[in-house]
Image (cartoon, rainbow, N blue to C red):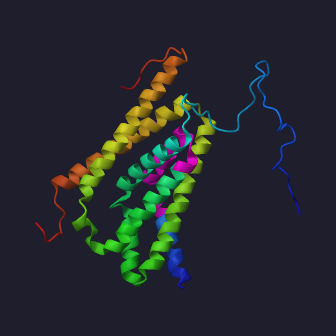
Amino acid sequence: MDVSLLASTFVTVFLAELGDKTQLAIVSISGTSSRPLAVFAGSSLALVLASLLGAAAGGSLSAVIPTNLLQLAASGGFLVLGVRLIRKAARAEAGEGGAADPERG
Amino acid sequence: MTSSEDSSSPQDPSGQMPSSQMGSSQSEPGPPADAGPGGDGTAAFLGVLATTFTTVFLAELGDKTQLAALLLSAQSGQPLLVFLGASLALISSSLVGVLLGRWLARLLPAHELERLAGLLMVGLSLWLGRQAVLHLNAPPPDLPLG
């Protein structure tokens, strides 16, 4: 077993992933949900599956899967989640009785 | 050798529930979770899991992590090992993300964090959408398939 290869892969991927948009999304979801285990399970599963697909497909992945469309879909998903969170925050603030101006539309 | 016993808290009588209204609310260790009226545990768990999975999976496909995995896998000829290392790294990074989120939830009030997270997600969405549209408009340079 080639430990150095394992370690180099780990370090490369881990560093590439720190501060990535995916991790920002995970931080957001985990911070605003009360179920960290579900967030951890879901994100781990998704990341491992995505990397499995990447490793299995080799270089031909971008020819098989329209990554631009996937990115558009992810963008739509982020938008829905974000707007929902903002509205929830605004509602919670209004419910508390604070005179909160909606600064951002 | 320091052995700290914090598995059994001495101040917590396990037999009775603290249901007195006069007692001042103690500091909760957990985040200010919004306790919904219908607390269906399994369904909520699966809902959060599905949401997280879909979001992360869509966002991650075709990302730079995969590029790194691809490169390493191609150079080494040991795809299984590369996959193992990448998976461990990804699981660790998502654990870091979850813990960071819980830590933030303890620091900030819930609606404040929700607004911040919402703005962050909208920003990510715009950035992702812009990238995707740019790539759609400009065809990749070295693809033989026109």
Tell me if I can see residue B128 in this picture: no
**Residue occupying the point 16% across, 56% down:** B138
Q: Position of residue A53 (x, y in %)?
A: 36, 67
**Side of A33 relative to A20 (left or right):** right
Q: Position of residue B36 (x, y in %)?
A: 55, 30
Q: Position of residue B68 (x, y in %)?
A: 39, 70
**Side of A100 relative to B1 (left or right):** left
Q: Is residue A63 above or below residue B93?
A: below
Tell me if I can see residue B86 in this picture: yes
**Which quarter of the image is occupied by the C terminus of chain B?**
bottom left
Part of the protein shown in magenta: A15-38
**Residue occupying the point 52% across, 77% down:** A6
By secondary structure, the bulk of the magenta-drawn segment is best described as helix
Q: Is residue A88 above or below residue B101?
A: above
**Which quarter of the image is occupied by the N terminus of chain B?**
bottom right
**Residue occupying the point 39% across, 63% down:** A50
Q: Is residue B112 magenta?
A: no
